[in-house]
Structure formats: structure tokens, C-alpha cells
Image (cartoon, rainbow, N blue to C red):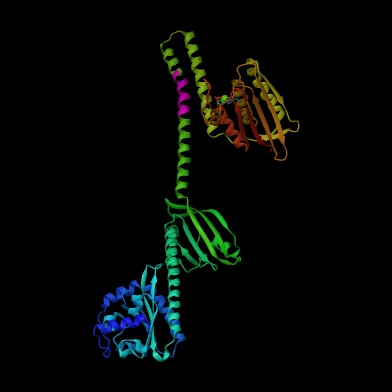
Amino acid sequence: MNEWIVNSRQRCLERGMDPLKIPTPGLKLSAIQLLEEKDKYRDILVVTKYFSEKILSFLSGTPHLIVVSNDTGYLLDNYGDKTMKSMINQLGIKSGIKCDEEFMGTNVVALALQEQKPIQIIGAEHYHTMLENAACYCVPFHFTNYHNLSGAISIMTSVEHHNHTYLALLANMVDSIERELSLRLTNHNQNLIQQLVVDNMRNGIIMTDERGIITEFNAYAEKITGRNRLSVTGTPVFPFEHFGSYFYQALKYRKQCENIELTFRYSLDQENVCLFDVLPILNERGELLGAFAQFRDITERVILEKQIINSEKFSAIGKMAAGLAHEIRNPLTSIIGFFQLLQRSNDQQKFQNYVGLINIELQSMKQLVSDFVVMAKPSTPERRAIDMKELLKDTIRFMNSQAILKNTSITAIYDDELTIAMIDPSQIKQVLVNLLQNAIESIEKNGFIQLCTELDTDNQEFKIIIEDNGVGMTKEELDQILNPFFTTKENGVGLGLSICYRIIENHKGYMTATSRKGFGTRFEVTLPLV
Ligand code: ADP
Ligand code: MG
């Protein structure tokens, strides 16, 4: 007989226990306490039940009972066949009682917990003669990986079914339970983390299986679609108006989509803008498992962009208005001044003088206003077939007198292939005059201005290049030349290039400029041939 059993029987004897009496449990959990304790061991009990049922089904036909107890020996649950249960019940052994040595005598649960070893007590090894027909096996457990819970699992059967392998079977079962529990825990934790991440993302997540049935639909997806997770999980994703078709493509053709801009509108002034990605989920063998989609919220960015565009627009309008006011105030002040002089003057000669000066100022105001109108909304070009060489020669002739004043020459190199182009001659002439005018003004004296043309038959367009060796511009200046009223000249208005830009734009062409401070400037105007 095992020494622990011998010692236990000795202790029972010393306590004066009567081996012929029916052992009666002394301590018992109340119904509530039992419930609480069972709740603490809930997962262990679930897993144990699962394994127990398997074992019991192997052993069917023979009476066996599997009992789970907590760390202090209270029985929490038992599984087994009815006859075995009722027999044990008659002995008062049921869930809630404590299997301690003091009341129950020598028993496996108390000993296994006390010694922390697998213990078997067969038949007459029990202290009480009542139990001499029972064969009991018990293995203690301590799940450090699972809330540090400990306790014991036992099998009871009748002596004739005694089998040494039961202890090994129980030890195995405890191992399996431990593995299962720690897997469950890891899984549970992973699920918790995953759910936490998925739910708290500022991004929407929708996942489906390979048939397009929704399996995952996070909080953000609920928000943008206005649909409830529970109501859509398990239903097909395809009917969703905004993105159903993309899922279809991902699942049917394994097509991946990225950065699709979707706008979900809730009311007139409330909308969400998202970038949407969807991709098929494939396993390592390339088999389709489902689809994964995410929505990245860019509403704030879009709102911000709109605000910036608006504020830039307003500031451009504001600058233009300020510039116009400034330009008009100058001639207006002169006119008022001359007018006052005129009122006081009786001299016919002076009268004529002032009227003449007022007329000049009024003319310049008229020019300013018409420039401004062209700049703001130039009339649509009336395009005709124009001999470009003639037009350019004409313009240079017109500007030459000004250039000569600065001892500057304008030379031209014409691409002979460039003959006819469809343009509005007066508007393009205005562009060339403005550009040549700027070039001349950039030169103090003894300058050099060159005009070239280049035909690009491939693209059906041509270039007019005007280059000077004048004062040039800094990068900051160059960046501003298209702003209406930007000027570095004392008497400049700053509308010339804005007008050029508008006219060229209306011709579906474009203009670029490069410049180096102190070296000169080059403007390139590109226009379509037809
Ligand atoms: P304005 O000639 O009345 O100043 P523009 O719109 O024609 O107005 O030109 C704006 C500004 O661009 C000029 O004041 C000048 O600073 C710069 N600019 C334009 N063309 C040239 C050039 N060829 N060389 C140097 N600076 C230039
Ligand atoms: Mg100018």
C-alpha cells in the first residue's frame, strides 16, 4: 500500500473515525457559492465535460464517474452514467460537498490535492468499508497559463473494473485540457484585440466569404452605410449601392481595386468621403477565401481642400479688387484735381489744357477697365486661318520704334514650315505686343530681343518664343507674374501677362516662362495649329 494512503488511514484512525459508518460530508457549498465557484471554473468545466464525454463513450457499458473538484476539494461537477451517479449520490457525494479527509476519510481527491500527485485508491485501501467496492483515480491540475486555476479530476469506478491505465488516461486528459484552455485563451485574447482594433479604427472594414456573404462589418462601416452590423452579417454584400459591384469584381474576377473615391451622403450638408480598397483573400494555394475591403475616411481632407480653394479664390478676388481700386484712384485723383483747377480758372488756354489732361486720364481709365474685362473674361477668340509669319512681322514692325528708343534690336527666326494657323489675330497680336513690351521694358539700353517660331507637326502645334537679355526675375517674382496687378514697375499696371494667359488659355494653348535675375527672360507660347 502506498505510504500516503497508509499515512492517511493512520490519521483517520487517530481522529477516531468509525470505518464502518457511512462517510458523511461535513462541509458543503451553498447553492449560490457553488454557482459562483462553477462560474470561476466555467471554461475548465466546459472542456472537461467535452473530454469526459469522449472517454465515457469509450467506456460505455461499465459504470464510471468523472468528477471535477476545485483547489480545496469541493466537488464542482460530475459526468457519468446514471446508475453510478445515483449510487454515489446515496453516499452523499455530490456537487458542492467537500471531499476532505476529516469527514470523508481516505479519498483520492483529498490526497491528490494534498500531495499534488496522481493518486489511485483501490477498494479496501479506502478507510471506510462502504467504499471497498470503489476504485478511484485522481490527478491534480494547475493551469498557470489559464488564470492560475488549480483543482483535481477524478475517475471512480468499481473494483472489478480497476485498471492501472486510468491514471495515465487522466494525466493525459489534464494535459489536453490545459492545451485546449491556453489555446482558447490566446484565441480569445486575439479576438479581443482584433475586435478592438477593427471597432476603433477610423477606417471601415468589411469582409466577406468566397460567396460574398458578409462576415465582418465594423463600427465605421456601420456609420458610413447607416446599416447595422447584425442585420447585414450573413447577407450578401453585392446589393450595396456604393461598393457592391467592386466586391463582385474582387470575388468573380479576383480584381483588386484601390483608392476609389466614394461619397456617402446623409443629408444635403452632411457627407463622408472615403477612399475604398477591396482585394480578394487567397490562401497559399491560391484558392479564394473571401474579400477584404477598407474605407479610409478623407472627409476632413476634402473639406480642408475646399476651404483652401475657396480662401484662395477669395484672396485672389480681394487682391484684384484692391489692385483695380488702386489703379482707378490715381487717374481719378488727377481728374478731380484738374476739375477743381478748371472750376477756378477763367483762362481759356488753361481751360483747354486741363480738359486735355482730363481726357488723357479718362482714356487711361477706359483702357484699364477694358483690360480688366479682357483679363476677367476675355471674349471667345474668333479663329481664322492666319499667315503667322505676316502677323509676327507686322507686330515686330509695330514694336520696333519702342525698341529703337532703347537702342535694342528685335531679331526674328521663323520656322519656314510654319505657315497658316487658326487663331484670333487681334488677340494673339495683343499677346505678342504685351510680351515684346515687357521685354523692351526689361532692358535699360543696348539690349537684344529674339523671337523664334517652331512648328511641331506631331502634336499639331507651334511655339512662339520671345527671349530678352533684360533684368530678369527672381524666383519669387516669376511665381507672381500671372497674379493680376502684380508689377515691379513704377507705372506698371500688372495686367499684361494675366491678359496673355487668358487669351492663350482660350486658344487652348499654354504659356511658360523661365528667367534668371540679371541675365534675361524667356517666354514660350504654345498654340494649337487648328
Ligand atoms: P506690367 O508690365 O504692367 O508690370 P505685366 O503683367 O506685363 O505687368 O508683368 C508683370 C511683371 O512681370 C512685371 O512688372 C515684371 O516684374 C515681370 N516681367 C514680365 N515680363 C518680364 C521680362 N521680360 N523681364 C523681366 N520681368 C518681366
Ligand atoms: Mg506689361
**Nearer-the-camera pick, 518 or 76:** 76
| Residue at screen point 33% across, 83% down | 6
Specify whether residue 447 is in view: yes
In magenta segment, residue 2: no
Give the quarter the ligand 2 occupies: top right
Q: In this view, does 67 lie to the left or right of 325?
A: left
Could you tell me if residue 80 is visible in this image?
no
Task: Tell me which segment is drawn in magenta.
Answer: 322-333
Counting from the top left corner in percent of width and height, residue 517 is at 58, 24
- The residue sitting at the left extreme is 16
From the viewer's perspective, tell me whether residue 4 is left or right of residue 17: right
Q: Give the main secondary structure, helix, strand or loop, of the magenta stretch.
A: helix
> Residue 308: where, in percent of width, then height?
46, 40
Q: What residue do we see at 47% from left, 50% from top?
A: 298
The single residue placed furthest to the right in the displayed view is: 416
Residue 507 image offset from top left, x and y in percent? 62, 36
Residue 64, quarter of the rendered image: bottom left
Name the quarter where the N terminus is drawn: bottom left
Front-most of residues 329 and 233: 233
Q: Is residue 327 magenta?
A: yes
| Position of residue 204 measured from the top left corner of the image (x, y, whole percent) | 46, 57
Q: In the image, is 318 to the left or to the right of 39?
A: right
Decide: is 402 above or below 255: above
User: Which residue is at the front of the view, 492 or 55?
Assistant: 55
Residue at left offset 45%, top offset 66%: 232
Q: Quadrant of residue 139?
A: bottom left
| Position of residue 240 in the picture relative to residue 37 (left or right) | right
Q: From the viewer's perspective, is residue 329 above or below residue 17? A: above
Q: Name the quadrant of the C terminus.
A: top right
Number of numbered discs present? 0
Q: Foreground residue, 412 or 119?
A: 119
